[in-house]
Amino acid sequence: MSDYEILDERFAALIIGHARLEKLWTGCRWAEGPVYVPAAKSVLWSDIPNDRVMRFDETDGSVSVFESPCGYHNGHTLDQAGRVIACEHGGRRLTRLEPDGRWSVLADSHGGRRLNSPNDVVVKSDGSIWFTDPTYGIDSNYEGHAAVSEIGASYVYRVDAATGAVQPVITDRIKPNGLAFSPDESLLYVADTGASHVPGLPRAIHAYDLSASGETIGPARTFAVCEAGFFDGFRVDRDGNVWASSADSVRIYARDGSLIGRIPIPEIVSNLCFGGPKRNRLYITAQSSLYAIYVNNHPPGW
C-alpha cells in the first residue's frame, strides 16, 4: 500500500513508492510555518495559538520548544546567510534571528501605518525579501492580538536588499497567504485564502510574471483552484512542480497547473518544506502535528 495517490505519471517520477508517511510529533493547537535549518540539523515550526516555536532535531528525533513566547510566529524562511526570518502575528512585523540570539526588525510598517500580521515569507536570489500580510493575526486574539487594520487592505510586500525599503508589489488579492518563486524566478505564486472573509471567492494559487529586473509584477492568472479547503503554504521543487497544502492532503501540481498527485494527510495541512541532508524529506505541518515523507525531488538550487 502506497502513501501516495498518483493521478498523472509525471508524479510517479517524483516519489519513492515504498516511502511511508511518518508522524513525527503531535501536540500543537495549529502547526504552521516549517523551515529546515541545515546548520542546526533541525526543523523549526510554529504553534501559533500557543505562541511558541517548536524544534525537531533530525539527529535523534527529539522535539523541544525553541522559543516561547515568540510574538505568535507564523511563516519562516532562511536568508542567504542562513539566518531565520520570521513572520510575527503578535508583533505585526517581519524579523530576523541574528547570530547573537536577538531578533532584529526588517519590516513593521508601510507609509507610517503598522502592518497587519505578516504570514509567509520567501527570499529571492537578489537578497530581496517578499512577504504576505493578511489580517489573520489581528482578526481575533487566537493567533495574535485583535486590532483594526491600519492599512485597510492585505498586500504582498518586497523588502529591498540594499535599502531595506518596504514596498507593496501585489495589491489585488483579498488575503494573500503562501507564496513561492518558480525555480528561474520568472514567476511568483501567491495563494489567496480570502474566501475566509468573502464567501464564494475562488480558493486558488495565482501566478504573476516578474519583470527582468525582478522588481515589478505582471497581471495575475489562476494557476490552480483548491478542491478541498484552502491552499495555505506551499513550496516549489527544482523542476517547477508546486507542492501545496489543502484540507486533506499535500497536492502536487505540474508547471502547467495540472494536479498530478496527492499525499493524503489525516489532518488539515497548513504548510510544508523540503529538508534533510539531501533536501529530499518533505516536512509537513498539519493542524496539531508534524509529519514527514521522503520524496524523489529537491528544492531549487539543490
Image: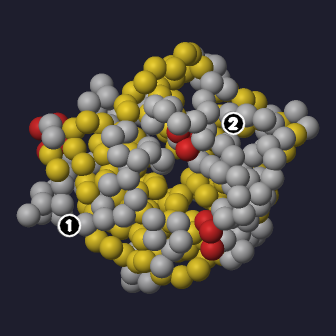
Q: Is residue 163 or residue 68 the one in the foreground?
A: 68
Q: Does residue 135 appear left or right of residue 32 in this picture?
A: right
Q: Is residue 49 above or below residue 263?
A: below
The percent coordinates of residue 237 (x first, y second) are 36, 42
Residue appearing at x 33%, y 40% in the figure: 227
Q: Amino acid at mark 1?
A: Arg
In the rendered image, which residue does mark 1 sit on?
20
The residues tagged by marks 1 and 2 sit, at their Cα atoms, a distance apart of 38 Å
Residue appearing at x 91%, y 38% in the figure: 112
Residue appearing at x 55%, y 44% in the figure: 196
In what quadrant of the picture does the N terminus appear? bottom left
Is residue 89 among what the camera can see? no
Residue appearing at x 26%, y 30% in the figure: 258
Say what secondary structure mark 2 lies in: loop
Is residue 249 among what the camera can see? yes
Q: Is residue 50 or residue 15 the one in the foreground?
A: 50
Say what secondary structure mark 1 lies in: loop
Residue 154 shows which numbered tag? Answer: 2
Residue 77 shows which numbered tag? Answer: none
The percent coordinates of residue 64 (x first, y second) are 54, 82
The percent coordinates of residue 252 (x first, y second) are 29, 42
